Amino acid sequence: MYSRTRNVWLLFSGSASGRAAHARGLVDLGSGSIEALRLILSRSEGRDEQNQRTNEYTSSWPLHTRYGYHKSLAFATLNWVFPNDDGPFAMMVASYNDESGDSRAFVVSGLIGMLPDWVELGRRWGAKLAEHRLPEFHAAKCENRLDMFSGYERGSRDMFQREFYGLITDARLWGFCTAVWQSAYAARWAEFEEFRSGVEGNFAHPYFLAFQHNVEAMCLRLDREGAPRNEPIAFVFDQQKEYEGRAKQLYDSMRNSKGGQLTYRHRLGSISFDSRFRQLQLQAADAWAYESRKHVSDVLIDKRHDGQRWQFELFRETARINISGFAPECLDRLASAMREDLNKKAGS
């Protein structure tokens, strides 16, 4: 449900006040433990084929129940099993995130996985950078032959992409992306600014809509698959001076909301914004954000027959990705529901 704090619509939020978010990266990953919890990937060939054929992305809007627009997430299922092994094992879940945008789409994308898998990815990523004597791997710069990639021809840059993307797809990570159709949102900007700005700040930029939806999608997926309730997600985002202060405010509002409107608040752990040079896992999040945004822009929006990139296929073949989109009709439903709820409140 929507909540209006003073003059600002914060989707699913209650009070915007409350304690500040933890900003310690992977420190606040959850203190609970269970009996030998293991995370496995369950892959059914029939399900994977159906997902790739009919559920390439989920055209969705914020997943609330009052208006009945709860959209399922079409991606490979996470199964949580509880074997009879002895000894406790703390399930520590982390998500690394980044944004990407062009004139057609703006996305916030994230990868989620277990802490040991993230540690191993960071180790392998650092070794790969050292092997090629690169200061970083940046997806857009590699694709467009910029900065440290300016001296490399297409074949060499393809090799870099295969090797670094392969590190991501080899890891047990799941990709989530929420996209906002830029032109459709711009045409409705005045209406969304009315709902999403006020004394607490301006949350009208599509970043905040995509940010909130993607965080929620990851939390709901863990809930749906029966993950222990006492295990939150530690969210790490790439540094973004323009948005990070308001994003933390929005996140706190979600985490401290009252009245049972948010069924997934127990999943909202720490949030931090860090450098991709200090946390190399953020470079992996950058790569997923870039490729998911390219797919949305070229395939889902422009519907180019030649828009399907082999780079995106590397992620798709894992059957562990989900793309949700705020297409024009979804934005209309969202705006209509917010307007209806506002009118009801004004009349009460």
Image (cartoon, rainbow, N blue to C red):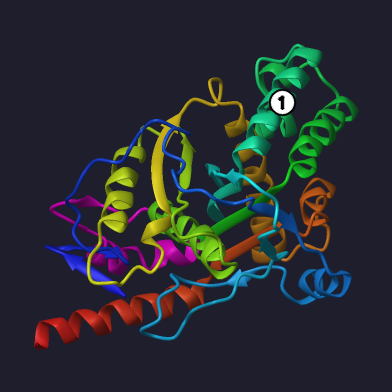
With respect to residue 129, does 228 lie above or below?
Answer: below
Q: Nearer the viewer, residue 69 or 229?
A: 229
Q: Relative to 112, does residue 320 appear above or below in the rendering?
A: below
* Residue 148 visible in the snapshot: yes
Question: Furthest-front residue in view?
Answer: 86
> Is 210 in front, or is 45?
45
Residues in magenta, as a range: 182-205
- Image quarter where the C terminus lies is bottom left
Residue type at mark 1?
A: Trp
Q: Does residue 104 appear in the picture of this structure?
A: no
| Location of mark 1 (residue) | 125
Q: Is residue 231 above or below residue 138?
A: below
Q: Position of residue 109 (x, y in %)?
A: 56, 49
Q: Position of residue 57 (x, y in %)?
A: 66, 68
Please say whether residue 184 is one of the residues in the magenta stretch: yes
Q: Is residue 74 left or right of residue 27?
A: right
Residue at the spot x=28%, y=50% of the render?
Answer: 252
Q: Position of residue 228 (x, y in %)?
A: 51, 59
Task: Provide residue 153's location: percent of width, then percent of height.
Answer: 86, 24
Residue 198: quarter of image: bottom left
125 vs 303, nearest the viewer: 125
Name which residue lies at 24% across and 40% down. Answer: 20
Quadrant assignment for the N terminus:
bottom left
Give the camera-side residue of 322 and 41.
41
Identity of the residue drawn at 82% across and 68% down = 48
Q: Secondary structure at mark 1?
A: helix
Give the left or right position of residue 148, taking residue 189 as reference.
right
